[in-house]
Amino acid sequence: MGEGVRSGDRRDVVWIAAIQDRQSVRQGAAWLLALALVLWIGLCVPTRAAQTSPVVPAPGSNVLGRIYSVAFSPDGATLAVGMENGTIKLWDVATRAIVRTLTGHASYVYSVAFSPEGTTLASGSNDGTIMLWDIATWAAVRTIAGNSSVGCVAFGPEGKTLASGSGDGTIRLWDLATGTMLLSLIGHTSFVYSIAFSPDGKTLASGSGDGTAKLWDAATGMLVHTLLGHTGYVRSVAFSPDGATLATGANDGTIRLWDTATGMFFHSIVSMANYVCSVAFSPAGSALAAGLGSGKIGLWEVTTGGVFDTLTGHSGEVPLGCLSL
């Protein structure tokens, strides 16, 4: 491992070692399972559905289908998988077996997310709806109708608010208790690929097909910063664990790092691929992983941008649009 890894937080050393050595460390093992499941999946955009790609068989089952999104429950025991046929497959992580199939959506399930306390699963679909599922019973407890394809969903860290990104370029914040819309954030001019709350819940980040990322005040819906610099679709946004840095990955093949307080760009990582499908920080924030269009997974040291490993083996893109750590 590189110098940056040796000097990083022990949680990151464990995280990286688990990925590289394929050990049964929970975070690393879960991360690897997610990588396997999202091989060749579609990103949270309608245009992906029109493209052809290999079909991924679910390990331990005879279910075939295109996978669009994955999310782990907070306790790491369950993996939710959004499918192209409108269903959500629930996997037992320990046995890697499908234990339940949720039905209700009429089209591709582009995004799934668990609430922080692990009591609710949210799903967003190309059918223009968001569904909320009670994890205790797996019953659908609420359906929220939007006015466009729902590409991405994310819970606020307090678990009371849900954000959704849509095909019409809008972002909506919802009150989970009532299902009513709290705010509509208008600013993007194309499909919203990715959204993420900052760890403290005060800021919402979004990435769009218009080539920009934006930072919003989550309480007021006011636009705080527009992040310019990418020359392609911004496919993924991710906050560092301390909330001080935002990483963005785009179709221009670069990852850009931004100071969230000022909105200033401070570092660019060239991925050596034609596009970056998704980005995710390690638990301590000193390492960054990205799924690439080349079929590789890159691992970088955040401070220097130095590559300390590249995982290979996939023959198609590795779009980790909904990577769950």
Image (spheres, rainbow, N blue to C red):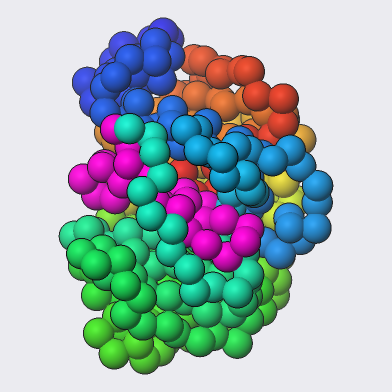
Which one is nearer the viewer's eye here, 307 or 325?
A: 325
Compared with residue 137, is residue 316 higher up or lower down, i.e. above or below? above
Percent x, y for residue 148? Answer: 63, 81
Percent x, y for residue 184? Answer: 48, 86
The N terminus - image quarter: top left
Query: In the rendered image, which quarter is residue 272 located in?
Result: top right
- x 49%, y 15%: residue: 308
Compared with residue 210, is residue 42 higher up or lower down, i.e. above or below? above
The C terminus - image quarter: top left
In this rendering, would 21 be left or right of 128?
A: left
Which one is nearer the viewer's eye here, 106 or 291?
A: 106
Query: In the rendered image, which quarter is residue 113 located in?
Result: bottom left
Which one is nearer the viewer's eye here, 114 or 174?
A: 114
Compared with residue 136, is residue 176 higher up or lower down, i.e. above or below? below
Q: Is residue 70 magenta?
A: yes
* Any part of residue 192 in sight: no
In this rendering, would 179 be left or right of 10?
A: right
* Any part of residue 137 in sight: yes
Compared with residue 141, is residue 85 higher up or lower down, i.e. above or below? above
Q: Is residue 149 magenta?
A: no
Percent x, y for residue 268? Answer: 59, 36
- x 74%, y 58%: residue: 49
- x 47%, y 80%: residue: 172
The boundaries of the magenta stretch are 69-94
